[in-house]
Amino acid sequence: MKEKNEKLTLRISDEELKEIDSFLSTNVNFTNRSEFIRFATMEYIANQRIGIITKNNSIHTEPIVEKTLSKAINFGYFKNLDSAYEEIINEAWRKSLISSLINMRIEEMEKIEKTMSKEVKYDKI
């Protein structure tokens, strides 16, 4: 079991706290705020490390990526941003990068789930 030696002070608004509490009141996966915030934080980190697709299915990349692709479009290497992303994704598929990314995500989620299962046991002590 991982020891919880560090204490973190978090400042949030009353509205944000009410939103968290409301969520927790209907979600049986979390027994307390700390457990939820730990999970949410690790989930966010995993998504930022691995994912580039946002919840509304638009592509989100680092600003340098968009700047580089915009320059490539201006030089005529791609027709537009969509065709640039399409070509990049197809090339990633051909080189098996997509399956590697998916496997990395699976491993990351398994680590998070393993950590969270230990946290639940610890929180109940």
Image (cartoon, grey):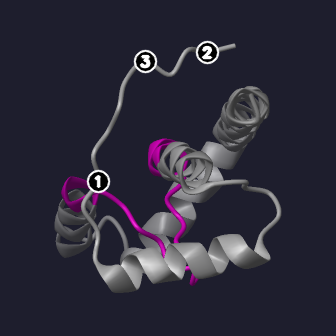
Q: Which residues are magenta?
A: 45-65
Q: Quadrant of residue 95?
A: top right
Please, is residue 9 above or below residue 72 in the view?
above
Q: Quadrant of residue 71?
A: bottom left
Q: Secondary structure at mark 1?
A: loop
Q: Secondary structure at mark 2?
A: loop
Nearer-the-camera pick, 16 or 109: 16
Q: Secondary structure at mark 3?
A: loop
Image x and y of residue 59, in percent: 47, 72
> What separation in Å lies between label 2 and label 1 (alpha carbons)?
21 Å
Image x and y of residue 21, in percent: 57, 74
Q: Which amino acid type is marked by label 2?
A: Lys
Q: Which amino acid type is marked by label 3?
A: Asn
> What separation in Å lies between label 1 and label 3 (alpha carbons)?
16 Å
Q: What is the number of callouts on the image?
A: 3
Give the number of the disc on residue 23.
none
> What separation in Å lies between label 3 and label 2 (alpha carbons)?
9 Å
Q: Which residue is mark 2?
A: 2
Give the number of the disc on residue 5.
3
With 12 as the anchor, is 112 left or right in this view?
right
Q: Is 71 covered by the magenta stretch?
A: no
Q: Which amino acid type is marked by label 1?
A: Leu
Q: Is 56 covered by the magenta stretch?
A: yes
Q: Is residue 55 visible?
A: no
